[in-house]
Each structure stands twice: as structure tokens, then as C-alpha cells.
Image (tube, helix red, strand yellow):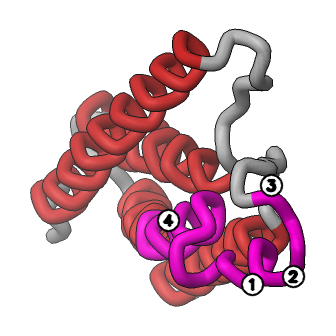
Amino acid sequence: MNSPQPYLTVASILTGFCISVFMFRIQRELRVRDRHPKWPNWLAWADYLIMASIVLSVVLVILPLVSVPLPSRTIYSVAAGSCAAASILLLAYPFAILDHYRIEIGTWRTREGESPHARHKGEPIERLIVVTAGIIAAAAFAAVVWSWNR
């Protein structure tokens, strides 16, 4: 007999952490907007990793496990796959945001002549990290669900 507790714990921790990170990012963007009203505002591509992790954790783990009295093996498999996928997305976030801010990873663009203040909606390596993390997370989700239901 499976227990929902491990999945609910993982999803709750991921959700709480991701919401904290996302609120920090929103506050930062609002401060930038207040200081520089003519600059464009946007979410970094890295922020979509956080949003996707929140959605996976809440919609595919927490809601099904707390709303279904006796979850089926399929529900548990989706919860396990979602925890794995959300964890992968969260793991990729620090690397993507480092490139967004040109800390360590993205410094080559400044060295090659681009202004340190020039910003783009998606920095090149940031986009690559986000897309790669999404593909790996989707593959991990599918592999976990498949392994539970074969």
C-alpha cells in the first residue's frame, strides 16, 4: 500500500521554496521598474522553471493526493513523476539565473563587447538551460510514470 505522505512532503517543500524564490524575483523586477521606468520589464526565462515547478507540484501532486480518498497506482505514478520533474526544473534554476544576470556563466557576452547593462528577455545560455531542463524533466516524468505502470 502506497502512502501519499512522501509525495506531499516533497511537493510542499518544492512549492514553498519556489514561491519564495518567485516573490523575490517579482520584488526585484518591481524595484527595477521603480528606478528605471523606461526600461522594459519581463520575467527571465529561468523564472518559468520556477513557475512550472509550482504548477507540477500543486496540480499533479498535492491536489490529486488530497482530493482522492484512495489514490490509484496511476495517481501515485503521476505524483512521483511530477516530483522528479519539478526537482529537475528547480535544479536547473540557479544555473539559468546566473546566466540571466551574467554572473560567471554569461560574462563572455560583456567581454565580447556587449554593454554590461544590455539585457535580453532570454540570454543565450539561459534559454538553452531552460529548454534542456524542460526536456529532461519531461523525459524523467515519462520514465517514472512508465516504470510504475509497466
Judge whether residue 107 is colored magenta: yes
Disc 3 vs disc 2: Cβ atoms closer than 8 Å?
no
Q: Which residue is mark 4?
A: 93
Give amino acid for label 1. Trp
Residue drawn 55% across the image and 25% down it: 32
> Residue 133, image x and y in percent?
65, 75
Discs 2, 1 touching: Cβ within 8 Å = yes
Query: Of discs 4 and 3, which sits in the foreground?
Result: 3
The Cα–Cα distance between marks 3 and 2, rounded to whole angstroms, is 18 Å
Tell me if 67 is positioned left or right of 122 in this view.
Answer: left
| Residue type pointed to by label 2 | Glu
Residue topped by disc 3: 122
Front residue (pair 14, 129): 129
Residue position for label 2: 112
Residue 108 — which label?
Answer: 1
The residue positioned 75% from the left and 84% from the top of the image is 108
Report, in whole angstroms, how far the alpha carbon at label 2 lies from the one at label 4.
Answer: 25 Å
| Distance of label 4 from label 3 (alpha carbons) | 13 Å
Q: CA distance from mark 1 to mark 3?
A: 15 Å
Which kind of residue does numbered mark 3 sit on? Gly
Position of the C terminus, as image quadrant, is bottom right
Q: Residue at x 83, y 49 (%)?
A: 120
First in sequence, mark 4 or 3: give its number.
Answer: 4
How far, Cα to Cα, is label 2 from label 1?
6 Å
Give the residues in magenta: 90-115
Q: Quadrant of residue 1?
A: bottom left
Name the residue: 71% across, 25% down.
41
Numbered disc in front, either 3 or 2: 2
Q: Is residue 100 above or below residue 45?
A: below
Q: Nearer the viewer, residue 58 or 116?
A: 116
